[in-house]
């Protein structure tokens, strides 16, 4: 092995604050360059594509308003995920929790269309929260009680939720006047969220999301329970010795994380679609994109507010290039995956330095 | 009734074959101490590559070979990120899945709805294929089925009875000791992840070239995630992977065979996923009782201190 140069990664003793702040943005730029290379290889002009994305997402008032619209579910789910990931609970199932939240709210809206708005809307958010929480609770209990891997169970719950929604909109809940489309009937006026002027921004959900981001931030940073979450995540052994209950921590974390994703689902059906639709029609993978929202924000709920806006823009821009370049809907996954990979690498920059070393052993 | 059972059993084997390839690969990957949650992405890259190559060249073997390579190359990205850069294996695996789904979607757009003109010829084994009942049940499959069946005991043998297998297991169980014994941890892990990617690619190829045979965006539909669960169910043992894969193949077949009974197809589509959760619970119980578990160094990056 004499003299072969190798990449060595070693720990930094101190991590400069500017680097911590800058690293996610550097990662994002590098990721966009890498995606450009992938696009070029697949025969798509990257500069043209990026131009379209930027223009679509931020280039007009309409684009901006749509970016805000898409940032709402990302913010709610992303804030919830940053909480779960802080406890090192790998909740990959926000997409399913979102769908179940949407389903529960729809059930209520269809069953009691005549309730006054100021009762029905809050109740829809409550049952949506509970539905998402229940969906998130299952992997939590399985993990805490039987040590069943939560990555797989939370993801399996997505497929189950998505088939549940399909079953409902193709079967018992299918609206008779929806021309054969897999939709439920349109919600009554009292089950519809108000929107900002001519936009699709359902501002009650946006306010709720911003509020909850602050609440969860304070919860993690300022409460004893938040401290327990952080310790459980960073050093589970120490947490156990300190007498912290893993079951309690994980269950509470997942009630909130699942519940927040559930709220996102309520916002989508009550604010955007005004009905339950097939799963892809409700969410173009918000629950999965929210993983990136949380990670890009370095698991800081306040940061997630900012990053959800960024990724919301990417989704809007993604729609724009799908139309103008004839790309499939899955294109956006290329962005998500590559960005995630580069954020991971960027985290590394802050904690380690990479050196090229010549091995001289033996 | 007998006819129904026999035909269901016969159908379970091709349905389980992509899972078997994927699981055998993931068993080796995880044995080296690297968790690759990107199997879904690796498989679908295999699917789109295989379909594209088979469609343009008409050569199914070349299609499978290049699909394996596609899976292997994408797996190497995971290897670089997790072994060399030592970042979180869970998140990297997710990223690999997303990249696979995205890139395959772009690559495959031109193939949507295209029929595939070429097939693997079923391997007729003299005498055995002509047996009544057993013949059609066991001896009239395409060659990939037999390759996967032979691969399971072969990989079991390599893992438990050879020096290579010993190195692989030691790297996954106790890398520090393996290192002092002169095993190159980095090389072993890279090879294991690459090998896992190759097999996942073949599994994906089986879906698009043999099982479907067509290209549909997102056609793996969770198969890669079931592979991760199967790896746990198999207790990281290639022979048990054989059992698990066909069990899940059977569940998938059941899903379609029960439809005529008037049960909602969407509810039936939940079956494999509910079954996965149940199987994981059962495996967790068994692992606790028998005190066996994941390779001890799974998800632990290695650096000399």
Image (tube, coloured by chain):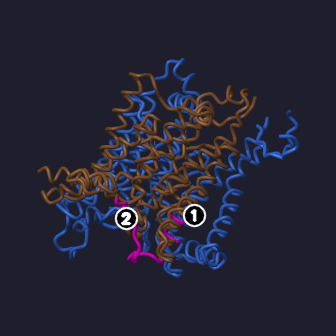
Residue A155 coordinates in the image, percent (x, y): 41, 48
As rendered, which of B253 and A180 lies closer to the eye? Answer: B253
Q: Colour of chain B?
A: brown
Report the residue at 55% width, 60% height from top: B99
Region in magenta:
B102-124
Residue A166's tag is none
Q: Which element type, helix, strand or loop, lies under badge 2?
A: helix
User: Does the rendering let one see residue B28?
Assistant: yes
Q: Which element type, helix, strand or loop, lies under badge 1?
A: helix
Report the residue at 46% width, 65% height from top: A69
User: Which chain hosts label 1?
Assistant: A
Dot 2 and dot 1 within a common chain: yes
Residue A146 coordinates in the image, percent (x, y): 38, 29
On screen, A142 above or below B209?
above
Q: Which residue is mark 1?
A: A335
Cα gap from disc 2 to disc 1, whole angstroms: 18 Å
In the rendered image, which quarter is residue B184 located in?
A: top right
């Amino acid at each position: 092995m004499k003299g072969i140069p190798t990449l060595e990664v070693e720990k930094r003793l101190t991590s400069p604050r500017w680097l911590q702040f800058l690293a996610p943005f550097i990662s994002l730029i590098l990721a966009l360059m890498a995606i450009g290379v992938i696009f070029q290889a697949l025969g798509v002009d990257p500069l043209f594509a990026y131009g379209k994305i930027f223009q679509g997402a931020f280039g007009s008032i309409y684009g901006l308003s749509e970016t805000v619209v898409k940032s709402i579910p990302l913010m709610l789910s992303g804030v919830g995920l940053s909480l779960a990931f802080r406890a090192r609970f790998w909740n990959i199932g926000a997409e399913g929790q979102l769908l179940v939240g949407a389903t529960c709210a729809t059930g209520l809206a269809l069953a009691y269309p005549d309730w006054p708005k100021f009762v029905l809307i809050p109740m829809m958010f409550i049952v949506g929260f509970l539905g998402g929480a229940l969906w998130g609770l299952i992997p939590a209990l399985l993990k805490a009680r039987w040590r069943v891997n939560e990555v797989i169970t939370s993801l399996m719950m997505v497929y189950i939720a998505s088939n549940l929604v399909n079953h409902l909109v193709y079967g018992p809940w299918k609206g008779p006047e929806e021309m054969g489309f897999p939709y439920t009937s349109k919600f009554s006026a009292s089950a519809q969220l108000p929107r900002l002027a001519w936009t699709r921004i359902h501002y009650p959900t946006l306010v709720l999301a911003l509020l909850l981001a602050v609440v969860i931030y304070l919860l993690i940073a300022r409460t004893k329970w938040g401290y327990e979450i952080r310790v459980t995540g960073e050093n589970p052994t120490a947490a156990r010795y300190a007498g912290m209950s893993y079951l309690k921590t994980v269950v509470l974390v997942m009630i909130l994380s699942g519940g927040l994703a559930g709220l996102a689902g309520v916002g989508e059906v009550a604010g955007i679609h005004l009905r339950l639709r097939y799963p892809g029609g409700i969410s173009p993978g918000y629950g999965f994109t929210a993983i990136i929202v949380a990670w890009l924000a370095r698991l800081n709920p306040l940061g997630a507010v900012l990053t959800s806006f960024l990724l919301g823009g990417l989704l809007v821009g993604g729609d724009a290039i799908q139309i103008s370049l004839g790309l499939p809907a899955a294109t956006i996954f290329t962005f998500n995956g590559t960005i995630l990979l580069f954020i991971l690498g960027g985290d590394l920059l802050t904690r380690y330095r990479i050196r090229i070393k010549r091995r001289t052993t033996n | 009734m007998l006819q129904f059972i026999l035909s269901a059993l016969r159908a379970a084997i091709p349905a389980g074959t992509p899972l078997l390839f994927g699981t055998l690969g993931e068993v080796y990957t995880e044995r080296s101490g690297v968790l690759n949650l990107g199997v879904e992405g690796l498989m679908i890259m295999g699917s789109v590559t295989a379909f594209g190559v088979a469609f343009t060249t008409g050569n199914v073997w070349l299609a499978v070979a290049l699909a394996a390579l596609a899976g292997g190359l994408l797996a190497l990205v995971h290897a670089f990120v997790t072994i060399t850069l030592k970042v979180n294996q869970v998140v990297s695996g997710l990223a690999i899945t997303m990249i696979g789904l995205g890139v395959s979607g772009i690559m495959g757009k031109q193939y949507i709805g295209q029929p595939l003109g070429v097939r693997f010829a079923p391997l007729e084994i003299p005498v055995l294929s002509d047996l009544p009942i057993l013949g059609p049940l066991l001896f009239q499959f395409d060659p990939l089925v037999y390759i996967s069946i032979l691969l399971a005991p072969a990989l079991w043998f390599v893992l438990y009875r050879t020096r290579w297998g010993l190195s692989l297991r030691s790297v996954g169980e106790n890398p520090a000791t393996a290192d002092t014994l002169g095993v190159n941890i980095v090389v072993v892990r890279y090879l294991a992840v690459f090998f896992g990617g190759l097999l996942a690619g073949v599994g994906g190829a089986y879906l698009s070239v043999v099982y479907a045979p067509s290209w549909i965006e997102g056609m793996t539909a969770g198969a890669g995630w079931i592979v991760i669960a199967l790896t746990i169910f198999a207790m990281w043992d290639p022979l048990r992977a054989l059992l698990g894969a066909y069990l899940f193949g059977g569940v998938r077949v059941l899903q379609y065979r029960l439809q005529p009974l008037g049960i909602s197809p969407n509810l039936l589509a939940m079956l494999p996923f509910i079954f996965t959760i149940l199987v994981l619970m059962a495996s967790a119980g068994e692992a606790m009782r028998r005190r066996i578990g994941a390779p001890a160094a799974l998800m632990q990056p290695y650096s000399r201190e």
